[in-house]
Each structure stands twice: as structure tokens, then as C-alpha cells.
Image: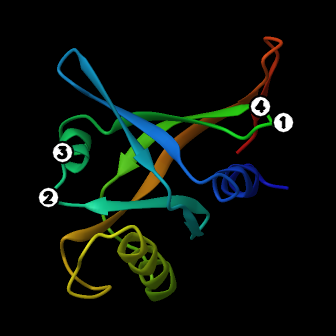
Amino acid sequence: MTGNEQVLDYLTNIPTWYLATCEGDQPHVRPFSFAAEQDGKIWFCTATTKDVYRELEANPKFELSGWHPGHGWIILRGKAGLEDKANAEVRRAGYEHMCGLGETYEGENDPVLTFFSVEEPQAWMCDIDGSWVPIEF
């Protein structure tokens, strides 16, 4: 299993994970729940009107963490590639997912709905006993 497959398998089997950005010296954490793979990269989506997007524009570094009971937790670090190159399949899946959460867009090609790639990924699987295993990309 590739690193992308490991990360996506984990993230798509939990309802939510938490993505952290930074504004100045203040960290910001918020829930995320959509992930897909395209062109050998992991993709997330958000809205250009949200603080998270503005924060990633100013500083593209992020870290996320999620916990799956019985499977430890994941840590993924990277830089957000904000050039939205999501293909029709990823865009449709993200649009449907976000609408299912209660967000409103004018369709899957609404310019407010944006997708960003995970660049320079680093990830680890961690356990409560203090052990951790790097995920190879």
C-alpha cells in the first residue's frame, strides 16, 4: 500500500480529522472530512471565503491529526498546493460531500468551492504506548 493509500484509507474511515493552520503566532484548528487522490496527490476541499483558506494563502504549512479507535492516530504534515486542479470526479465528490454537511454552493464548479493538494507530505501512525511508524511517500 502506498503512503497516499494508507493516509486516504485512514482518513476515509473516520468521520472527522482536525487540520491546523497558523495565523501569526496563533494556531487555528478546525474539522475536515473530505479527502481524495488525484495525480498521485492527496486533495482536500474548502471554500475560498473561509479563514482556513486565507490562512493557507499566507502560510501554506499545515498539520492534521485524527484518531480511529483501535487503530491509533495519524499525523500528516504538508504544504497546501492552492492551485485548484481537481478533476471532474474529485470536484463532484467534494461538492456532494460538502453539500451533505450543509454547505451551499452553486454547483461543483462554483469558484468558491476550492480544492488544495498536499505537497511535501510527511505522516506517521502513532499509538498510545508512545510508538510511531512513519508512512513512506
The answer to which of 57 and 39 lies nearer the viewer is 57
Judged left or right of residue 115, residue 33 is: right
Q: Which residue is mark 2?
A: 49
Kindly identify the amino acid type of the residue bearing the numbered disc 2: Thr
The answer to which of 103 and 134 lies nearer the viewer is 103
The answer to whether 71 is drawn above or below residue 114 in the figure is: above
Query: Is the C-beta separation of discs 1 and 2 under 8 Å?
Result: no
Q: Position of residue 67 (x, y in %)?
A: 66, 36
Looking at the image, the residue that sits furthest to the top is: 130
Picture quadrant of residue 20: top left
Identify which residue is drawn at 29% across, 67% down: 114
Q: Which residue is mark 4?
A: 72
Q: CA distance from mark 4 to mark 3?
A: 29 Å
The answer to whether 30 is drawn above or below residue 39 in the figure is: above
Kindly identify the amino acid type of the residue bearing the numbered disc 3: Asp
Q: Position of residue 74 (x, y in %)?
A: 67, 35
Kindly identify the amino acid type of the residue bearing the numbered disc 1: Gly
Q: Position of residue 16 (x, y in %)?
A: 54, 49
SS for tag 2? loop
Pick the quarter of the image with the N terminus.
Answer: bottom right
Q: Which residue is mark 3?
A: 51
